[in-house]
Image (cartoon, helix red, strand yellow):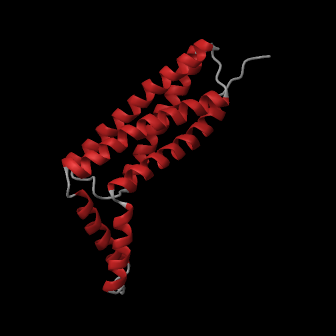
Amino acid sequence: MENSTASLKSHIVQYGILLGGISVVFALMLFFLDMHYSQESAVGIISIIITIAIIVLGQYNFRKENEGFLSLGEALKLGVGIALISSIIGVTYQVLLVTVIDPDTIPKMLEIAKNQLYDSNPEMSQEQLDQMLEMQSKFISPNMMVAFGLIGGLFIGFVISMITGLILKRNRPE
Protein backbone atom coordinates (compact mmCIF):
# COMPACT_ATOMS: atom_id res chain seq x y z
CA MET A 1 0.00 0.00 0.00
CA GLU A 2 2.92 2.33 0.77
CA ASN A 3 4.28 1.81 -2.76
CA SER A 4 0.85 2.61 -4.24
CA THR A 5 0.67 5.93 -2.34
CA ALA A 6 4.17 6.97 -3.42
CA SER A 7 3.36 6.03 -6.99
CA LEU A 8 0.08 7.97 -6.78
CA LYS A 9 1.91 11.12 -5.67
CA SER A 10 4.54 10.78 -8.37
CA HIS A 11 1.85 10.35 -11.04
CA ILE A 12 -0.02 13.40 -9.74
CA VAL A 13 3.10 15.56 -9.86
CA GLN A 14 4.29 14.19 -13.22
CA TYR A 15 0.97 14.58 -15.04
CA GLY A 16 0.05 17.80 -13.25
CA ILE A 17 3.27 19.42 -14.46
CA LEU A 18 2.69 17.95 -17.93
CA LEU A 19 -0.85 19.35 -18.13
CA GLY A 20 0.25 22.70 -16.71
CA GLY A 21 3.12 22.91 -19.19
CA ILE A 22 0.93 22.04 -22.16
CA SER A 23 -1.67 24.55 -20.98
CA VAL A 24 0.93 27.31 -20.74
CA VAL A 25 2.32 26.45 -24.18
CA PHE A 26 -1.24 26.57 -25.57
CA ALA A 27 -1.83 29.92 -23.84
CA LEU A 28 1.45 31.29 -25.22
CA MET A 29 0.42 30.16 -28.68
CA LEU A 30 -2.83 32.11 -28.25
CA PHE A 31 -0.85 35.10 -26.99
CA PHE A 32 1.49 35.12 -29.98
CA LEU A 33 -1.48 34.78 -32.34
CA ASP A 34 -3.13 37.69 -30.48
CA MET A 35 -6.12 35.46 -29.65
CA HIS A 36 -5.83 35.57 -25.86
CA TYR A 37 -8.31 38.44 -25.50
CA SER A 38 -11.36 36.79 -26.95
CA GLN A 39 -13.26 33.96 -25.36
CA GLU A 40 -13.67 31.67 -28.36
CA SER A 41 -15.62 28.49 -27.64
CA ALA A 42 -13.16 26.46 -29.76
CA VAL A 43 -10.33 27.46 -27.39
CA GLY A 44 -12.33 26.24 -24.40
CA ILE A 45 -13.17 22.97 -26.13
CA ILE A 46 -9.53 22.36 -27.02
CA SER A 47 -8.50 23.09 -23.42
CA ILE A 48 -11.05 20.60 -22.09
CA ILE A 49 -9.91 17.95 -24.57
CA ILE A 50 -6.28 18.44 -23.49
CA THR A 51 -7.30 18.20 -19.82
CA ILE A 52 -9.32 15.03 -20.39
CA ALA A 53 -6.47 13.45 -22.36
CA ILE A 54 -3.84 14.12 -19.68
CA ILE A 55 -6.05 13.00 -16.79
CA VAL A 56 -7.00 9.79 -18.64
CA LEU A 57 -3.33 9.22 -19.50
CA GLY A 58 -2.34 9.66 -15.85
CA GLN A 59 -5.09 7.34 -14.61
CA TYR A 60 -4.40 4.73 -17.26
CA ASN A 61 -0.63 4.69 -16.62
CA PHE A 62 -1.20 4.50 -12.87
CA ARG A 63 -3.53 1.55 -13.39
CA LYS A 64 -0.98 -0.14 -15.66
CA GLU A 65 1.77 0.27 -13.04
CA ASN A 66 -0.60 -0.84 -10.25
CA GLU A 67 -1.00 -4.41 -11.56
CA GLY A 68 -3.95 -3.32 -13.71
CA PHE A 69 -6.05 -2.07 -10.79
CA LEU A 70 -7.48 1.39 -10.17
CA SER A 71 -10.11 2.23 -7.59
CA LEU A 72 -12.51 5.13 -8.00
CA GLY A 73 -10.86 6.85 -5.02
CA GLU A 74 -7.44 6.60 -6.63
CA ALA A 75 -8.84 7.87 -9.92
CA LEU A 76 -10.38 10.88 -8.15
CA LYS A 77 -7.18 11.63 -6.24
CA LEU A 78 -5.20 11.44 -9.48
CA GLY A 79 -7.56 13.64 -11.47
CA VAL A 80 -8.06 16.30 -8.82
CA GLY A 81 -4.34 16.31 -7.96
CA ILE A 82 -3.36 16.68 -11.59
CA ALA A 83 -5.93 19.47 -12.00
CA LEU A 84 -4.66 21.26 -8.86
CA ILE A 85 -1.01 21.29 -9.96
CA SER A 86 -2.00 22.27 -13.48
CA SER A 87 -4.27 25.05 -12.17
CA ILE A 88 -1.49 26.47 -10.01
CA ILE A 89 0.82 26.57 -13.04
CA GLY A 90 -1.90 28.05 -15.25
CA VAL A 91 -2.92 30.70 -12.73
CA THR A 92 0.71 31.69 -12.25
CA TYR A 93 1.01 32.18 -16.01
CA GLN A 94 -2.24 34.20 -16.13
CA VAL A 95 -1.08 36.54 -13.37
CA LEU A 96 2.27 37.01 -15.14
CA LEU A 97 0.40 37.68 -18.39
CA VAL A 98 -1.87 40.40 -17.02
CA THR A 99 0.74 42.04 -14.78
CA VAL A 100 4.06 41.68 -16.65
CA ILE A 101 3.86 40.23 -20.17
CA ASP A 102 0.82 42.19 -21.39
CA PRO A 103 -0.54 44.64 -18.80
CA ASP A 104 -3.11 45.83 -21.36
CA THR A 105 -4.87 42.45 -21.33
CA ILE A 106 -7.63 43.41 -18.89
CA PRO A 107 -8.50 46.76 -20.54
CA LYS A 108 -8.56 45.07 -23.95
CA MET A 109 -10.79 42.27 -22.61
CA LEU A 110 -13.15 44.89 -21.21
CA GLU A 111 -13.23 46.68 -24.56
CA ILE A 112 -14.10 43.42 -26.34
CA ALA A 113 -16.80 42.73 -23.74
CA LYS A 114 -18.16 46.25 -24.23
CA ASN A 115 -18.38 45.76 -27.98
CA GLN A 116 -20.04 42.36 -27.56
CA LEU A 117 -22.56 43.77 -25.07
CA TYR A 118 -23.37 46.66 -27.35
CA ASP A 119 -23.70 44.42 -30.42
CA SER A 120 -26.04 42.02 -28.63
CA ASN A 121 -28.14 44.81 -27.03
CA PRO A 122 -27.94 47.99 -29.15
CA GLU A 123 -30.84 49.56 -27.22
CA MET A 124 -28.88 49.34 -23.94
CA SER A 125 -28.27 52.74 -22.33
CA GLN A 126 -24.75 53.97 -21.62
CA GLU A 127 -25.48 53.78 -17.88
CA GLN A 128 -26.50 50.11 -18.13
CA LEU A 129 -23.45 49.35 -20.26
CA ASP A 130 -21.12 51.05 -17.79
CA GLN A 131 -22.73 49.19 -14.89
CA MET A 132 -22.28 45.81 -16.58
CA LEU A 133 -18.67 46.60 -17.50
CA GLU A 134 -17.92 47.67 -13.95
CA MET A 135 -19.22 44.34 -12.68
CA GLN A 136 -17.22 42.43 -15.29
CA SER A 137 -14.05 44.33 -14.39
CA LYS A 138 -14.36 43.07 -10.80
CA PHE A 139 -14.44 39.49 -12.06
CA ILE A 140 -11.37 39.78 -14.29
CA SER A 141 -8.98 41.25 -11.76
CA PRO A 142 -5.82 39.20 -11.05
CA ASN A 143 -7.13 38.14 -7.62
CA MET A 144 -10.40 36.89 -9.05
CA MET A 145 -8.51 35.15 -11.87
CA VAL A 146 -6.56 33.22 -9.25
CA ALA A 147 -9.68 32.29 -7.28
CA PHE A 148 -11.77 31.30 -10.29
CA GLY A 149 -8.80 29.56 -11.94
CA LEU A 150 -8.15 27.34 -8.93
CA ILE A 151 -11.79 26.63 -8.10
CA GLY A 152 -12.72 26.09 -11.75
CA GLY A 153 -9.71 23.86 -12.35
CA LEU A 154 -10.50 21.70 -9.33
CA PHE A 155 -14.16 21.43 -10.30
CA ILE A 156 -13.35 20.46 -13.89
CA GLY A 157 -10.71 18.02 -12.65
CA PHE A 158 -13.20 16.43 -10.26
CA VAL A 159 -15.89 16.00 -12.91
CA ILE A 160 -13.48 14.62 -15.50
CA SER A 161 -11.78 12.27 -13.05
CA MET A 162 -15.14 11.03 -11.74
CA ILE A 163 -16.32 10.13 -15.24
CA THR A 164 -13.02 8.69 -16.44
CA GLY A 165 -12.48 6.95 -13.10
CA LEU A 166 -15.81 5.17 -13.43
CA ILE A 167 -14.77 4.05 -16.92
CA LEU A 168 -11.20 3.01 -16.04
CA LYS A 169 -11.73 1.59 -12.54
CA ARG A 170 -10.83 -2.01 -11.96
CA ASN A 171 -11.01 -3.12 -8.33
CA ARG A 172 -8.79 -5.82 -6.87
CA PRO A 173 -10.58 -9.10 -6.35
CA GLU A 174 -11.30 -9.81 -2.69
**Position of the N terminus by quadrant:** top right
Q: Is residue 32 left or right of residue 49?
A: left
Q: Is residue 60 left or right of residue 110?
A: right
Image coordinates of residue 121 in percent, x first then y, are 38, 80
In the rendered view, would you say 67 is above or below 113?
Answer: above
Q: Residue furthest right?
A: 174
Identify which residue is drawn at 24% across, 64% down. 107
In the rendered view, would you say 76 is above or below 126?
Answer: above
Identify which residue is drawn at 39% across, 49% down. 146
Identify which residue is drawn at 19% across, 47% down. 101
Number of numbered labels in the structure image: 0
Along the line of sight, which residue is nearer the eye, 13 or 156? 13
Identify which residue is drawn at 27% across, 57% down. 37
Image coordinates of residue 122 in percent, x first then y, are 34, 83
Image coordinates of residue 25 in percent, x first then y, are 29, 37
In the rendered view, would you say 1 is above or below 85?
Answer: above
| Residue 33 visible to the viewer | no
Q: Quadrant of residue 116?
A: bottom left
Along the line of sight, which residue is nearer the eye, 1 or 166? 1
Q: Is residue 144 left or right of residue 11?
A: left
Image coordinates of residue 128 in percent, x first then y, are 37, 82
